[in-house]
Amino acid sequence: MGTARHGVLGGFFMLRGGMGMQAQQAEPTKKLLLTVNEAAQMLSLSRPFFYRLMQRGEIASLKLGGSRRIQLTELQAFVARQVSTQKGY
């Protein structure tokens, strides 16, 4: 049996050992930065609507090279702001 090696590939956690490979869904809350698609999916929003929220400054994002990323803590803060402003409904 070989030594197990670990790596993250495309949102899946891969385990490699002497018996082949197994894929398990990685916990999304373990990621610090999310793609726009991942962030939109986490909030159950469409990608175009999520971009509008970023353009309006309601959700902050980072530009890394040619990629846009959203911090997990930013999503959590956005949800908290939405909950606090809508408590009376």
Image: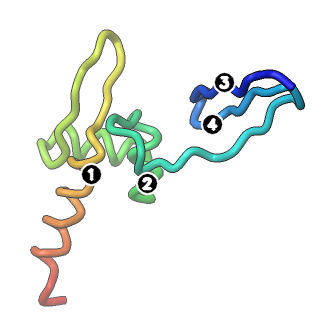
Labelled pair 2, 1 in contact (Cβ < 8 Å): yes
- Residue 7 vs 23, above or below: the answer is above
Looking at the image, tell me whether mark 1 or mark 4 is earlier in sequence order. 4
For marks 3 and 1, give the CA distance. 31 Å
Disc 4 on helix, strand or loop?
A: strand
Disc 3 on helix, strand or loop?
A: strand
Coloring basis for residues:
rainbow
Going 47% across and 51% down the picture, which residue do you hit? 41
User: Mark 3 against mark 4, which lies toward the viewer?
Assistant: 3
Going 43% across and 54% down the picture, which residue do you hit? 42
Q: What is the quadrant of residue 84 in the picture?
A: bottom left
- Residue 37 vs 83, above or below: the answer is above
Q: What is the quadrant of residue 88 in the picture?
A: bottom left
Picture coordinates of residue 5 (x, y %)? 66, 24
Disc 1 on helix, strand or loop?
A: helix
Residue bearing mark 3: 5
Disc 2 on helix, strand or loop?
A: helix
Looking at the image, tell me whether mark 2 or mark 3 is earlier in sequence order. 3
- Residue 7 vs 78, above or below: the answer is above
* Side (left or right) of 20 relative to 55: right
Q: Which mark is residue 13?
A: 4
User: Mark 2 against mark 3, which lies toward the viewer?
Assistant: 3
Q: Amino acid at mark 1?
A: Leu
Residue bearing mark 2: 42
Going 22% across and 33% down the picture, which residue do you hit? 61
For marks 2 and 3, give the CA distance. 29 Å
